[in-house]
C-alpha cells in the first residue's frame, strides 16, 4: 500500500469528521427549518464519507481516525466562534466546504486505485452539491453583504 495515498485518505477522513461536527454545531444555531434540514442532511453525507473511506482504509491495512485531530479541532473551533447565528453559521460552513471541495478535488487528481476512485467521486459530487446550495442560500438572502453596523465602522475608519 502506497503510504502517501493512505496519509492523504486519512486526512480526507479527518476533514469529513470535522465537517460532521461542524454541521451539527451550525444546524443547532439555525432557526429556519429549510436551512437546518439541509445542514443536517449535509452532515449525514459527511458521516457516510467517513464510514465509506474508513472501510476502504481498513481493508487496505490502514488505521482510519475516529476522533478529531489538530486540524479538525481548529476547524471546529473556528466554526464555534463564527457561528453566532444563522447567517454567520452558513458563512462558516461555506469556508469549511471550500476546504473539503479542494481536498476532494486534489485527492481525485492523484492516481486513486479502482476500489477507491468511485468513493472519492461520489464524495466530490456531494461536496459540489453542498457548496452550490450554500452559495445560493447566501446569495438569495443577501448574506454576502457586510452587515450594516460593520459598514458604518468601515466608513468611519
Ligand atoms: Fe460538504
Image (cartoon, rainbow, N blue to C red):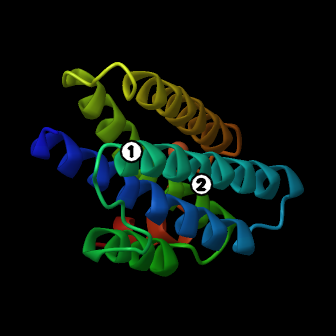
Q: Closer to the N terminus: mark 2 or mark 1?
A: 2
Foreground disc of the pair 2, 1: 1
Quadrant where the image shows the C terminus: bottom left
The label on residue 47 is: 2
Residue 66 placement (x, y as % from top left)? 44, 70
Taking 79 as reference, is 90 left or right?
right
Residue drawn 39% across the image and 74% down it: 68
Using the image, tell me which numbered label, if any, was put on residue 59.
1
- Quadrant of the image occupied by residue 147: bottom right
Q: Nearer the viewer, residue 115 or 147?
A: 115
102 lies above or below 85: above
- Rendered image: mark on residue 103: none
Residue 156 visible in the snapshot: no
Residue 41: where, in percent of width, then height? 73, 49
The quarter of the image holding the N terminus is: top left
Residue drawn at point x = 37 percent, y = 66 percent: 65
- In the rendered image, residue 46, in percent from the top left (x then y), is placed at 56, 50
Quick check: 99 above or below 148?
above
| Contact check, label 2 and label 1, Cβ < 8 Å | no
Q: Is residue 91 left or right of residue 45?
A: left
Give the residue at x 36% y 77%.
Answer: 73
Label 2 vs label 1: CA separation? 18 Å
Q: Residue at x 44, y 52 (%)?
A: 54
Q: Is residue 74 visible?
A: yes
Graded by Cα atoms within 10 Å as few (under 14), some (14 to 19) or many (20 or more), the crowding at tag 2 reads: some
Amino acid at each position: 500500500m502506497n503510504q502517501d495515498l493512505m496519509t492523504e485518505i486519512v486526512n480526507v477522513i479527518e476533514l469529513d469528521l470535522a465537517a460532521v461536527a461542524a454541521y451539527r454545531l451550525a444546524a443547532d444555531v439555525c432557526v429556519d427549518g429549510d436551512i437546518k434540514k439541509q445542514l443536517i442532511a449535509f452532515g449525514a453525507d459527511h458521516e457516510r464519507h467517513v464510514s465509506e473511506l474508513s472501510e476502504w482504509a481498513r481493508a487496505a491495512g490502514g488505521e482510519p481516525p475516529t476522533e478529531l485531530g489538530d486540524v479538525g479541532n481548529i476547524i471546529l473551533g473556528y466554526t464555534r466562534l463564527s457561528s453566532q447565528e444563522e447567517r454567520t453559521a452558513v458563512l462558516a460552513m461555506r469556508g469549511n466546504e471550500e476546504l473539503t471541495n479542494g481536498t476532494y478535488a486534489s485527492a481525485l487528481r492523484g492516481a486513486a486505485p479502482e476500489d477507491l476512485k468511485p468513493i472519492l467521486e461520489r464524495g466530490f459530487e456531494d461536496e459540489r452539491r453542498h457548496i452550490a446550495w450554500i452559495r445560493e442560500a447566501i446569495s438569495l438572502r443577501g448574506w454576502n453583504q457586510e452587515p450594516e453596523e460593520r459598514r458604518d465602522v468601515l466608513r468611519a475608519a
